[in-house]
Image (spheres, grey):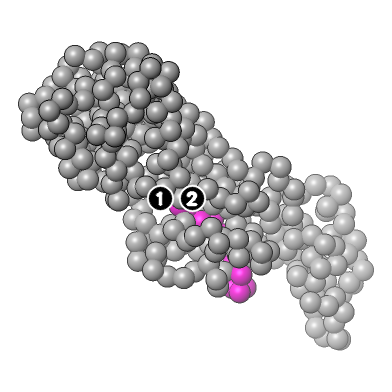
Amino acid sequence: MAVARSAGNRATVRDVAAETGLSIATVSRVLNGQANVAAHTRELVLRAVDRLGDQAPRRRGAVPGGIYVRCPYLLTDYFGLIVSSVAETVELHGRQLILGAGEAAQRTAVLPTLGDRPDIAGAILILPPEPAEELVRLRDRQFPFVVIDPRTPPPKDIVAVSAAHFAGARKLMSHLVELGHRRVGIIGGPEDWLASDARLAGYAASLADAGVLPAAQLLRTVVEPNTENGYRAACELLDLPERPTALVGFNDKMAVGAMWAAAERGLSIPRDLSVAGFDDIDVSRATRPMLTTVRQPLQEMGRMAVTLLMRLLDRHTLEALHVSLGTELIIRGSTGPAA
């Protein structure tokens, strides 16, 4: 938009942004008197305001341009924790949050229209089901966005935040190996999820360190990683002629399903069978015994994603585009020495 205005027409924040080469968000922060602006940036904006004279925009109370958060899943304890931390952090930045959530959202083609909405400055996409090609097209339109927990390997120049799935899975399997377990049943997640592949690779690496090759008959994968599917997969594994001495679930919910299957068969945990999960959500502390698991920094993932998005909106250069946050092994009562 041109900077010049006819008499009586006041210039906008967008005009000052065009004049300075800064983002609309940065200009707004200066005009709103916010402190989180570099001194030279503030001076650049104020000089542009002087040049525009009476046409320059006045200070306003709200930062223009909301943040669209797409989470096309039920906001359970896993996704709910991420979305809540995103919402809290967006509010700290003075932005409005626009949420698209629920499984029905998977059937809505949102990405092609995001760049056309004047009320949206950027987006955070949580485990997006869209193929990488759609993310690339959105990036090519110069629309700022960050992916949380990418479903597939993100293109190298798209900003993404995830947990260290491989390292977490390796720590967990090393814990079981140290307890003497060699015949470990793995209940994996959806085959087209990046996290599933990374965790399987982590499990395999620890078993290989102990001289054990992963056995195909001890692996089950599911389409939907919930408690019921964890139960069904565990039933199949526990009914093998030579059952495993330990079961590892893709997440805590599937591990709880495995506990159900063990209880039906009269197996004591951890005396007869060790069970472990991944995520460390509330259900991991509601079982008896409590569940050994890997803690993901779910809330920090949300906070980090917002921070990176704000830097994109301010046109900062990001050197670390794919951020992997550390995980932590939480050892509780559901794992013990192999029988």
Region in magenta: 115-127
Number of labels in the image equals: 2
Give the residue type at disc 2: Thr
Q: Secondary structure at mark 2?
A: loop
Q: Position of residue 35 (x, y in %)?
A: 73, 48
The structure residue drawn at horizontal position 85% and vertical position 67%, both measured from the top left corner, is 19
**Residue at 53% across, 67% down:** 111
Residue 334 seen by the camera: no
Going by the image, does 228 lie left or right of 99?
left
| Residue occupying the point 82% across, 85% down | 8
> Mark 2 or mark 1, which has the lower sequence index?
2
Residue wearing tag 1: 192
Does 66 sit left or right of 2 as displayed? left
State the residue at coordinates (40%, 28%): 204
On the image, numbered disc 2 is attached to which residue?
152
Q: Which of the pair 288/152 is nearer the observer?
A: 152
SS of the residue under disc 1: loop
